[in-house]
Image: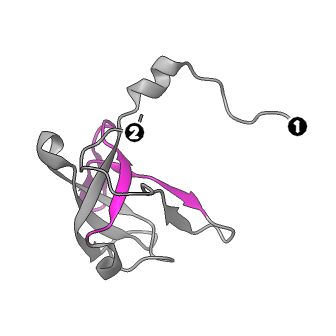
Amino acid sequence: MADASPQIGFDDFLAVDIRAGTVTRAEPFPEARKPAIKLWIDFGPELGEKKSSAQITAHYTPESLIGRQVLAVVNFPPRQIGPVRSEVLVLGLHDDNGAVVLAVPDKAAPDGTRLC
């Protein structure tokens, strides 16, 4: 079986800054082209609170996300998604139906902790 993933060097991996953060606020995002939720995520004192949107409505409601810890790439440039300026990329995986399931720490880590 051929490997579909391109090879990268370890330095490439280190260049991607993935951190743990806690969702402090979540709201429906009805203006989005695909169903999404607006998120405000606390990444601790170094990075503070960042905003994002995520297409995670199949498995999550805004209320169910408050206080939940997530993983996100924090060093991509901000991206305008409709009226929302997304500052981080929240990470997830597709389930069997193609819906996104959040990638989360197994146990709580301090907000702002970098994936290693």
Amino acid of disc 1: Met
Magenta includes 72? yes
Which residue corresponds to mark 2? 115
Amino acid of disc 2: Leu
61, above or below 71, in the image: below
Residue lying farthest to the right in this orientation? 1
Please state if 99 lies on the left or on the right of 35 as rendered: right
Residue at left 46%, top 18%? Answer: 11
Q: Are marks 2 and 1 in contact (CB under 8 Å)?
A: no
Question: Residue 102: x, y in percent?
Answer: 47, 62
Residue at left 40%, top 32%? Answer: 16
Question: Residue 89: x, y in percent?
Answer: 37, 49
Chain part drawn in magenta: 67-94
Q: Whole-Å distance between the Cαs marked 2 and 1?
A: 29 Å
Quarter the C terminus occupies: top left
The foreground one among 77 and 58 is 58
Dot 2 lies on which element?
Answer: loop
Residue at left 77%, top 33%? Answer: 3
Marker disc for residue 1: 1
Residue at left 48%, top 22%? Answer: 12
- Classify mark 1: residues with Cα within 10 Å, few (<14), some (14-19) or many (20+): few
Please state if 1 lies on the left or on the right of 64 as rendered: right
- Displayed quadrant of residue 57: bottom left
17, above or below 93, in the image: above
Question: Residue 43: x, y in percent?
Answer: 22, 49
Quarter the N terminus occupies: top right
Eye-nearest disc, 2 or 1: 2
78, above or below 22, in the image: above
